[in-house]
Amino acid sequence: MHKIVVQGGVPLRGEVRISGAKNAVLPILCAGLLADGPVLIRNVPNLHDVKTTLRLLAELGAGITLDDSFDIRIDPRSVRSHVAPYELVKTMRASVLVLGPLLAKHGAAEVSLPGGCAIGSRPVDQHIKGMQALGADVSVEHGFIKASAKRLRGARVVFDMVSVGATENVLMAATLAEGRSVLENAAMEPEIVDLAECLVAMGARIEGAGSGRIVVEGVERLHGGEHAVVADRIETGTFLVAAAMTGGRITATHARPDTLDAVLDKLKEAGAELDCDGDRISLDMHGRRPHAVNFSTAPHPAFPTDMQAQFMALDCIADGVGVINETIFENRFMHVQELLRLGADIRVEGHTAIVRGVDKLGGAPVMATDLRASASLILAGLVAEGETTIDRIYHLDRGYENIEAKLSGLGARIRRIDG
Ligand SMILES: CC(=O)N[C@H]1[C@@H](OP(=O)(O)OP(=O)(O)OC[C@H]2O[C@@H](n3ccc(=O)[nH]c3=O)[C@H](O)[C@@H]2O)O[C@H](CO)[C@@H](O)[C@@H]1O
Ligand SMILES: C=C(OP(=O)(O)O)C(=O)O
């Protein structure tokens, strides 16, 4: 089992190249199942979750080719199975995103129920509701979602709550449905826009992606195509917070500043000087200690839950008191106990965490509980006095490409060890 060891105290300096977004590439890989020919996907991050998705697509029968730069070609013409087994789904919830494509393209899908995870219960009722609205028969039996339909029919789908995954699943299914679908109360995340762009490149007819109302005119077939994955806004935000916490000065390159408004606003409030120029975001903290920031997580374009843990780490060493409200996932404060081990002062009351900034944190062994919790512990380790060892970093490898190499490139003293 690998661990990450960080020696704190170095202000980050330099340039870091941002990878393609995990949360965009996973639905896009699944969208490849809808096509009649090969789909080429570029700017793919080398992540554990990507490999899990490729295993799942291969299990369904798709042909997968990878080249040296990790561009991926999916050939869905050989797909024979419509079963996503528990062994794969349990390791990655995003596997449920094969439901819509399999149902729309092959008329049947059996997908293991993903179940909960460390951050919350994460039901899939909205995915199921959407497929039923499009005319599918859906039942949940023996831990599997079983769905079938001769051909899906376009329909108006009003989601009960904003769900990124349900919007993506229903959007993909609607591309091959007969007639027009209208998705109301749709998620507006940049990853939905990226998925829609990929689907349009495959011949889909979609309008309104990125707004709360998406209109899809179903087509008979989708052809192969090519798409480059959008930059990872959460990876970008994580590096910017790292620089702000260490009083550093960095530039994130190959980024998409327009996807990061809420995060950049909070960094400015924390005292960072920011400059966006094309796909480059430069942050200069001028060696200052950040001010504490208050925020509430909410669907895009508000503050993303996937940045909550990293900003909590910032508040831990900031000047003042930060009040953090987590409104998306009921159990996304698992990092609090570990940050306390590093000397943070945090009180949790229900969905709110009150973080009183301390002058310094002290390195200690800590345990990662989920993906962004892992990132927050690395950030805390970067400013803690002495050594922080982070265990269970397999969570980190799900969603960050080469994080220790990228941070080392910015001057951090960080390494991966066996143990
Ligand atoms: C692979 C991917 O893109 N993951 C992201 C995606 O997860 P994911 O798509 O799973 O998250 P959702 O947007 O669906 O979840 C939002 C909220 O809706 C609830 N819900 C969702 C679906 C449903 O059928 N019923 C239901 O009650 C969830 O429990 C949660 O409380 O969006 C989350 C919210 O931005 C991010 O934290 C994840 O990083
Ligand atoms: C919660 C996350 O991912 P997933 O939905 O894949 O668990 C995340 O990216 O922070």
Image: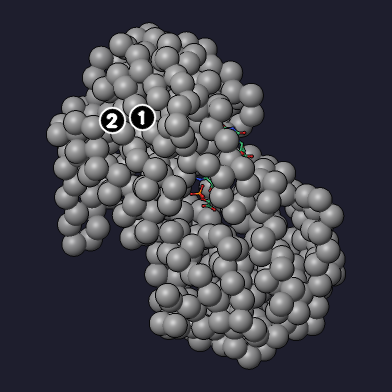
**Dot 2 crowding, Cα within 10 Å, few <14, some 14–19, many 20+:** many
Residue at 42% in and 14% down: 137
**Is residue 37 among what the camera can see?**
no
In this rendering, would 164 be left or right of 320? Answer: left
Q: Position of residue 387 (x, y in %)?
A: 59, 88
The answer for how far apart the CA atoms under marks 1 and 2 are is: 6 Å
Query: What residue is shown at x 68% (from left), y 71% (from top)?
Result: 338
From this viewpoint, is residue 69 visible?
A: yes
Identity of the residue furthest to the front in this view: 142
- Outermost residue on the bottom side: it is 386
Residue under circle 1? 110
Q: The residue under label 2 is which amino acid type?
A: His
- Residue at image coords 15%, 32%: 77
The amino acid marked with disc number 1 is Glu
Circle 1 SS class: strand
Q: Which residue is mark 2?
A: 82
